Image (cartoon, rainbow, N blue to C red):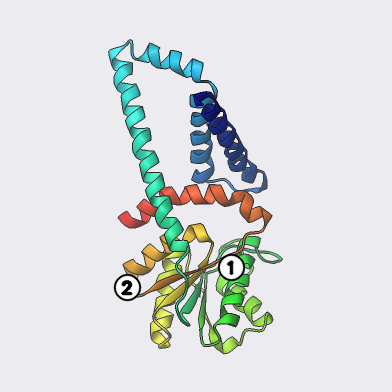
Amino acid sequence: MKMLLRILLTIIAFVFLIWFIAPIGFGVHNLGNALGIIICLAVIFRFGFSGIYERLKHLMYSNAVTTVLLRVIRIGAGIFVIYAIIVSGFMVYAMNVKPAKDDTAIVLGAQVKPWGASTLLMQRINAAQQYLAKHPASKAVATGGQGADEPMSEGVCIYENLTAAGIDKNRIYIEDQAQNTEENIRFSFDIIQKNSLEKDVAIVTDSYHQLRARIIVHKTDRSVKVSAVNTHNNYIGLAAYPTYFVREWIAIPVEILK
């Protein structure tokens, strides 16, 4: 039974190792890749090469200094596993909070390519279009500034694509100054307040991003109710999903401590 479990864990870790490495081939590389690869290699070593692991452990326990080092590593790993499980649970919760009414949609920006919206941004635009079509009383804030390598602001790109998809332009407000998620949300709330829009919001973004966005909203105004409108990932989005999900394990505590 233990042998079967070791084989199963090794296979799972190998599959995820490939899953974390693959996005690097199309330009997705961040702390999520690095941390995911390290975790997978550690699991493969622990369970796939258990004989070597046990001999190394015995060798380290024969020396006082390496004994302390090994115990620190094992305690740290245990704490990290507990943390990852807890934060992942909160991430899953945040991505499953559905809009209860016609909340104002905040469509978070992403990169605009020379030829138009990137795959990531277009997925958010499509999710926003579906939400606004289903909730005809809702308004939306299209948010995102213009980077040095972008032909237009992300907010304008979102606006143009939504109106081209049939959404009334009077339902969409443009925010075109934000340079990060915090500014996306904070500047959007300025627009919501200035135009007396529905205060409760539906965040339109990738599901793994919802918890961090929710934290930022509550830092801005704790009385606001936050719901999630998640994108539907294509094959590129699915290939990079574990990388971005693990990256949020790092980004979320950073956001809380700001």
Does any portion of residue 156 appear in the rendered image? no
Residue 229 vs 56, above or below: the answer is below
Please indicate whether residue 113 sits to the left or right of residue 153 in the image: right
Q: Residue at x 57, y 74 (%)?
A: 128
Q: Residue at x 32, y 24 (%)?
A: 71
Identified by mark 1, the residue type is: Arg
Image quadrant in which you'd find residue 217: bottom left
Give me the C-alpha separation between circle 2 and circle 1: 24 Å
- Find disc 1 in the rendering and name its residue: 124
Q: Residues within 10 Å of mark 1 (few under 14, many from 20)?
A: many
User: Which one is nearer the viewer's eye here, 234 or 110?
Assistant: 234
Please indicate whether residue 231 sits to the left or right of residue 183 in the image: right
Residue 124 vs 240, above or below: the answer is below
Secondary structure, mark 1, is helix
Residue 215 is situated, as x and y percent measured from the top left of the image, at 37, 63
Residue 146 is situated, as x and y percent measured from the top left of the image, at 56, 68
Identified by mark 2, the residue type is: Asp
- Find disc 2 in the rendering and name its residue: 221
Q: Residue at x 60, y 74 (%)?
A: 158
Which numbered disc covers residue 183? none
